[in-house]
């Protein structure tokens, strides 16, 4: 079990979650965040903090976002750890809720 | 959560703390946690773990979902692979982690046991005595069904002294440091006592939760150095991780301990571990029997042994075990005797055993108070004096109270003691120490699982444990009784 950053983080990257994670298990890519599944302790604190509701418990991950489970695990291995909150991406507002953002994911 | 001390400033380590923090490495852990009944219901757990629940049990639990009796709303379900492996061969451990419909059969109990919110001046801090308790995590690697912090773990709305409702929040370093500094400055400028509360300086902080050991080394290190820099002279860590995931106490962890001690040699670390049953740390043979260690004592599970030995090798820290005695888990004098013996052999002090608290649903877990006393007393009959240090404690909102004695004999001439009596002794007043050592005597009630079950049979109440109960007997005869008791003793 782990929590998973889903599609709606892409091009938004608000980072409110970083501040509440007790184990600093978020990793940062150019335009999204991911959670390291082996480090996440399932505390769920990040879920209500995300202004765009992008974080899911593994069991609640919508079917059309199933790929994000594997994606989080993979990218957490290569991206740097992020421990400080920062400004969201400049066009975060416009991209919130836009469907099919996976194609814009920058690795 | 608009408390006066709420700040969003980032913690700025001192140069000494910074040097220590730079030496700390985070370890990598594979707890293989299963969270939630859903995984069991949907058959999404590894095949062997599916055996933790029978299909009938899952059906019964599923039927409660979304109702007032939902067991997961009371307390989330969580287990590690390590604990599952142990539980496979232990009924006691299965009972500890397996959700059961009986938990919500009677939802009586306190939403905030111990009235903690009335002792919380800053979010995430409970200030009692000269000790402050901080919540640093709202989860553990696995969850005990009987957890007395179910309100924190399940993030329930708890009433505050101002009448508002909100989940209990976690402590933030900058807020806690600011509070300790201000409190201790006020105490110092008032000759050693706080001008409003009469409390002494805060010199000890207990890190709790949840389990602080779910935090990464770097998070722990930040807390420890910040507290040490504030002048806290001992830091307690309350953890069940040695039972749930002993591999957490790895090389990187002990390296951090040593570096902390080198940087802050005057600050003591006190680990409060939580073993309920010897099945949590002893190896068993095929017949389910513990195995004699040719070196003496009994053979331990290697990972747990490594963790406890790692602590034992460091003379500047202490390890104490404390655990509640819970129905179907460790209400067993033989198990308790073996546990106390093995703890002490391995440099773990036996600190407290507890009667279950009056949490929501406590009737499913609590063993009657007098029965717990008898079990512990029975278990200590086979122990040497140094192995039998543990006392039985029951947590009154006024403070920790020892169940000091239970007698079957009536006290001649004293009504209400026909079936014997119970002696309770206040070990610590939550406000300050002035009531320490005061006693309360009640007539026996073998069914009693909480203080209110004695409301109608209070004989003598020097400690004031029943001061809120209206029908308490008038003080004059009680005082006379007390003289009589002293003479008899």
Image (cartoon, coloured by chain):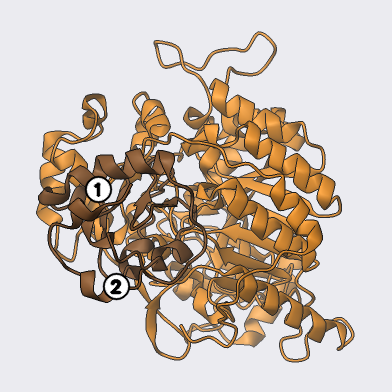
Toward the viewer: B282 or B445?
A: B282
**Residue behind mark 2:** A91
Q: In the rendered image, what is the letter of the chain coloured orange?
A: B
The answer to whether residue B440 is above or below residue B477 is: above
The answer to whether residue A67 is above or below residue B461 is: above
Q: Residue A30: in sight, yes or no?
A: yes
Q: Mark 2 packing: few (<14 Cα in 10 Å), some, or many (20+)?
A: few
Q: How far apart are marks 2 and 1 (CA)?
A: 28 Å
Q: In the rendered image, what is the letter of the chain coloured brown?
A: A
Q: Residue B392: in sight, yes or no?
A: no
Residues marked 2 and 1, same chain = yes
**Residue behind mark 1:** A58
| Left or right: B431 as drawn, with respect to B203 | left
- Hey, which quadrant is residue B33 in on the image? top left
Q: Where is residue B131 in the image (x, y as percent from the top left)?
A: 70, 67
Q: Residue at x 51, y 36 (%)?
A: B28
Q: Where is residue B217 in the image (x, y as percent from the top left)?
A: 60, 46
Q: Where is residue B205 in the image (x, y as percent from the top left)?
A: 68, 63
Q: Mark 1 packing: few (<14 Cα in 10 Å), some, or many (20+)?
A: some
The answer to whether residue B258 is above or below residue B170 is: above
Q: Residue at x 51, y 52 (%)?
A: B211
Q: Which residue is drawn at 87% across and 87% down?
A: B189
Badge 1: chain ID: A
Badge 2: chain ID: A
| Left or right: B256 as drawn, with respect to B122 | right
């Amino acid at each position: 079990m782990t929590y998973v950053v889903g599609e709606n983080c892409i091009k938004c990257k608000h980072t409110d979650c970083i501040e509440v994670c007790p184990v600093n298990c978020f990793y940062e890519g150019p335009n999204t965040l991911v959670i390291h599944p082996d480090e996440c302790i399932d505390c769920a604190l990040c879920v209500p903090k995300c202004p765009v509701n992008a974080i899911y418990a593994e069991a609640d991950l919508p079917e059309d976002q199933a790929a994000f489970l594997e994606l989080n695990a993979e990218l957490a291995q290569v991206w740097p750890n992020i421990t400080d909150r920062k400004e969201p991406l400049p066009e975060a507002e416009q991209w919130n809720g836009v469907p099919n953002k996976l194609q814009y994911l920058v690795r | 959560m608009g408390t006066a001390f709420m700040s969003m400033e980032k913690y700025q380590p001192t140069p000494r703390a910074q040097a220590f923090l730079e030496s700390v490495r985070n370890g990598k852990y594979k707890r293989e946690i299963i969270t939630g009944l859903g995984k069991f219901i949907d058959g999404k757990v590894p095949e062997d773990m599916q055996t933790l629940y029978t299909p009938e049990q899952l059906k019964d639990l599923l039927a409660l979902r979304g109702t007032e009796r939902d067991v997961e709303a009371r307390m989330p379900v969580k287990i590690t692979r390590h604990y599952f492996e142990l539980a496979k061969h232990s009924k006691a451990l299965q009972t500890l982690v397996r959700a059961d419909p009986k938990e919500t059969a009677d939802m009586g109990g306190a939403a905030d046991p111990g009235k903690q919110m009335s002792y919380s001046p800053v979010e995430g801090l409970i200030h009692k005595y000269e000790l402050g308790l901080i919540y640093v995590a709202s989860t553990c690697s696995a969850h005990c069904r009987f957890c007395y912090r179910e309100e924190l773990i399940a993030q329930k709305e708890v009433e505050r002294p101002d009448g508002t409702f909100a989940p209990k929040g976690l402590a933030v370093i900058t807020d806690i440091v600011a509070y300790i500094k201000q409190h201790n400055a006020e105490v110092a400028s008032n000759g050693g006592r706080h001008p409003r509360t009469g409390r002494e300086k805060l010199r000890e902080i207990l890190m709790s939760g949840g389990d602080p050991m779910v935090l990464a080394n770097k998070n722990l290190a930040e807390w420890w150095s910040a507290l040490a820099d504030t002048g806290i002279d001992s830091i307690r860590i309350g953890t069940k991780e040695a039972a749930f995931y002993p591999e957490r106490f790895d090389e990187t962890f002990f390296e951090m301990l040593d570096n902390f001690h080198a940087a802050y040699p005057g600050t003591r670390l006190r680990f409060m571990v939580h073993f309920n049953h010897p099945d949590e740390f002893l190896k068993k043979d095929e017949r389910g029997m513990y195995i004699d260690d040719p070196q003496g004592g009994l053979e331990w599970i290697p990972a747990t042994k490594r963790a406890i030995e790692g602590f034992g090798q460091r003379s500047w820290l202490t390890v104490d075990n404390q655990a509640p005695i819970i129905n179907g888990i460790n209400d067993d004098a033989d198990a308790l005797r073996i546990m106390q013996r093995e703890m002490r052999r391995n440099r773990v002090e036996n600190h407290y055993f507890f009667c279950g608290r009056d949490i929501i649903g406590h009737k499913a877990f609590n063993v009657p108070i007098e029965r717990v006393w008898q079990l512990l007393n029975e278990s200590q009959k086979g122990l040497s004096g140094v192995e039998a240090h543990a006392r039985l404690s029951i947590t009154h909102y006024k403070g920790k109270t020892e169940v000091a004695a239970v007698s079957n004999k009536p006290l001649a001439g004293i009504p209400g003691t026909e079936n014997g009596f119970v002696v309770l002794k206040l070990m610590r007043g939550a406000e300050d120490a002035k009531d320490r050592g005061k006693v309360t005597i009640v007539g026996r009630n073998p069914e009693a699982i909480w203080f209110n079950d004695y409301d109608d049979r209070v004989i003598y109440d020097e400690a004031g444990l029943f001061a809120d109960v209206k029908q308490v007997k008038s003080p004059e005869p009680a005082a006379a009784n007390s003289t009589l008791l002293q003479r008899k003793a």
